[in-house]
Amino acid sequence: MSLQERTQRQHALERAAAVVAQCRKCEIGSTRRNSAYGEGDPCAALMVVGEGPGETEDKLGRPFVGRAGELLDKMLLAIDLPREDVYICNTVKCRPTLDVGHRLANRAPTPDEMRNCRPYLEEQIAIVRPRVILALGAPAAKSFMGEKFSITKQRGQWFEGPNGTPVIATFHPAYILRQTGGAMTEVKKLVFADLKQIRARLNEPLSAPEQKPEQHSLFD
């Protein structure tokens, strides 16, 4: 990838992020503090798509920077993908919240919110042109594979996404963090199996024999 191409993609993403920052299509555009458009390598081979920003992401204007983000970083490193080599974003760019009286709680985005934000996500995919998309959690997976998609039954399977890009889904880091004991261990094993599929898919075009990246135990 030439420096010129990289720069052009970065500028295109910055222009798109500025548009999103002014978006008020949904009520959450007025209740959020900052939009969290996305970040990472504009020429990334892997795009990670989550559900939506949480409290920390809303405060900092960046995706996946809370506890789930820390775990995501470890997940990516388990297959030798530093965060800075990946492009990370969400299906919606503003934090969906629910007023519970004394504070704002996170909630899943509504279908209308996801529809309103969909052009922004599709624009990101068109600019970055990833070779693989990883959908984290059921809402993100369903945004690509449809409402009938089951994260428990169909995670780890390949689907065709936008522009023919291969899409695979796995459990969201926040879901992993809610598990305890043996349940957490089992979920981590499933997620690591999915991540290894991504590593294998990204390695496929290599024609010349090269040393394979060392695989790490998950989330050490």
Image (cartoon, rainbow, N blue to C red):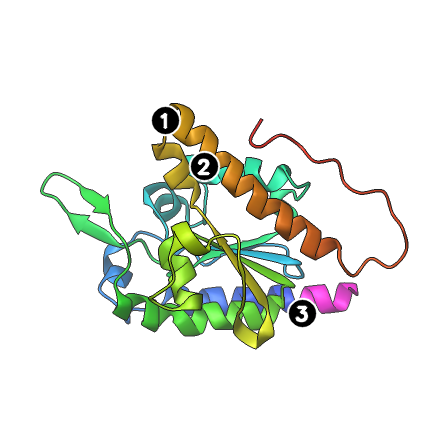
Magenta residues (range): 1-7
- For the residue pair 187 and 86, the one nearer the viewer reads as 187
* Residue for point 61% across, 61% down: 132
* Residue for point 87% across, 47% down: 210
Task: Name which quarter of the figure residue 142 lies in.
Answer: bottom left
Whether residue 70 is visible:
no
Q: Amino acid at mark 3?
A: Gln
Mark 2 nearby-residue class (10 Å; few <14, some 14–19, many ≥20): some
* Main SS, magenta residues: helix
Task: Name which quarter of the figure residue 112 lies in.
Answer: bottom left
Which element type, helix, strand or loop, lies under badge 3? Answer: helix
Residue to which mark 2 is pinned: 187
The quadrant in which the N terminus is found is bottom right
Residue to which mark 1 is pinned: 180
Contact between labelled residues 2 and 3, with CB atoms less than 8 Å apart: no
Q: Amino acid at mark 1?
A: Thr
Residue to which mark 3 is pinned: 8
